[in-house]
Amino acid sequence: MKAVIVALSCLLALSGTLAADTCYQDVSLDCGQASNTLALPRCNAVYGEYGRHGNVATELQAYANLHLERSYEYLLSAAYFNNYQTNRLGFSKLFKKLSDEAWEKTIDIIKHVTMRGDEMNFEQRSTMKVERKNYTVELHELEALAKALDTQKEIAERAFYIHREATRNSQHLHDPEVAQYLEEEFIEDQSKKIRELAGHTSDLKKFITTNNGQDLSLALYLFDEYLQKSG
Amino acid sequence: MKAILLAIVGLLAVCLPASATQCHVNPVNIPREWVTMHRNCRMSMRQQIQMEVAASLQYLAMGAHFSKDVINRPGFSKLFFDAASEEREHAMKLIEYLLMRGELTTDVTTLLQVRAPERKTWEDGVAALEHALRMESEVTKSIRNVIKSCEDDSEFNDYHLVDYLTGEFLEEQYKGQRDIAGKASQLKKLMDRHNALGEFIFDKKLLGIDI
């Protein structure tokens, strides 16, 4: 009976082992062989079954691509508000900042993907992807803010999704490293950004509706000035 | 049913503009004589912006490649990620210029597209630097073509844009090319006999570490 238990626990231990000693085994096997190559396939940064189960690894690649696309879209919005007809330099600044932040995050996520022993795939898209129809950056002030708010929510909800995938309490899918990366580098800042944009739309909404819409043109001018000076 | 509802909503939208909430100021007309860029010049500038964006994505792929655990060349990775940001800034500078000249009031959305970079792996640092050098040469050639289409226009020689591209962009291109070419040949010499060691030392040099 005891022997059975020992054998069983040995088996369990074997199936439960992830990376223990495998790189070392590669080295011991290959060094001293009559060949001058060293493959060492298991000497890599992959651990915790990253990329082997579930979709956390591919979702992280897709998350970099999402930031990349949105970064260049924000750049175009910044350009549009900076032409001589719109001439809203505060709005332009707001979008330029969103673009810069998304660009920096793109590079950061790519580095993180490779830190976990994976490679970057620029074609990878999320399973959550929603097709956008008739996308345009040529929008007026409130429309553009609304779009930015929706986009920031899309980015934030994607982080929730990846976090959920990474924290499923199963042996193969639990990845606390990815979860804490998202929490630390994305989730808190995203909630602040969303609150800020929602606040802007609330302000504009009030300006537009009060005083029978008479304040509109002055309100937009002043709000743009405010955006130039704040943040 | 849905169609009927849509029709009603559509009708309402048409019939009720007078009482609708106005959320934006109506566009105004001001003189446009000062907006003088010509079509060919504008189109080639737009293409140039797309080219800078594509270069930024190709450099991102290089940064990603050298950042892999099995490649492990953080110096090269940094060099290429920085280059990616630089190409993005070039695109922004060209956009700024168009805005200064009264452009980009329309067709802004179609200005650029994000497409996955073509190449994803390189045999070694030399291969990547040589690829970068070829890419920069292409960019330089393309800027020269923009200059040509902006000054050869029989109705409007765009002196100022030509001067800007010549003085700022070509200057930066030639300096950048010289820098990459110097790095490529230095690395190639280093790797001639000491392949792995040469690349390792050069990579640390790129990181600013002297060993």
Image: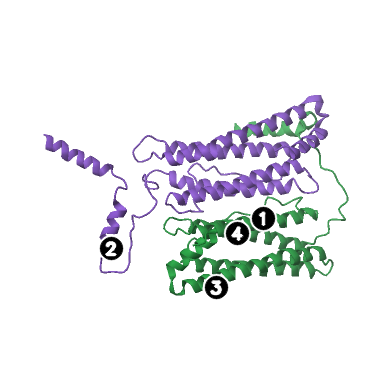
- Parent chain of label 3: B
* Residue occupying the point 81% across, 26% down: A212
> Is there a contact, CB below 8 Å, between mark 3 and mark 4?
no
Q: In the rendered view, does B123 fall on the left or right side of B181? A: left
Chain designation of label 4 = B
**Chain painted green:** B
Question: Nearer the N terminus, badge 3 or badge 4?
Answer: 4
In the rendered image, residue B179, in percent from the top left (x then y), is placed at 61, 67
Callout 2 and callout 1 share a chain: no
Contact? badges 3 and 1 (CB < 8 Å) = no
Q: Which mark is residue A54?
A: none
Local secondary structure at mark 3? helix
Residue occupying the point 46% across, 63% down: B200
Q: Which residue is mark 4?
A: B83
Element assignment for label 2: loop
Disc 4 and disc 2: Cα gap in Å?
39 Å
Specify which label sits upstream in the sequence, 1 or 4. 4
Residue B89, numbered label: 1
The residue at which mark 3 appears reads as B185
Between the C-alphas of marks 3 and 1, the distance is 27 Å
The chain painted purple is A
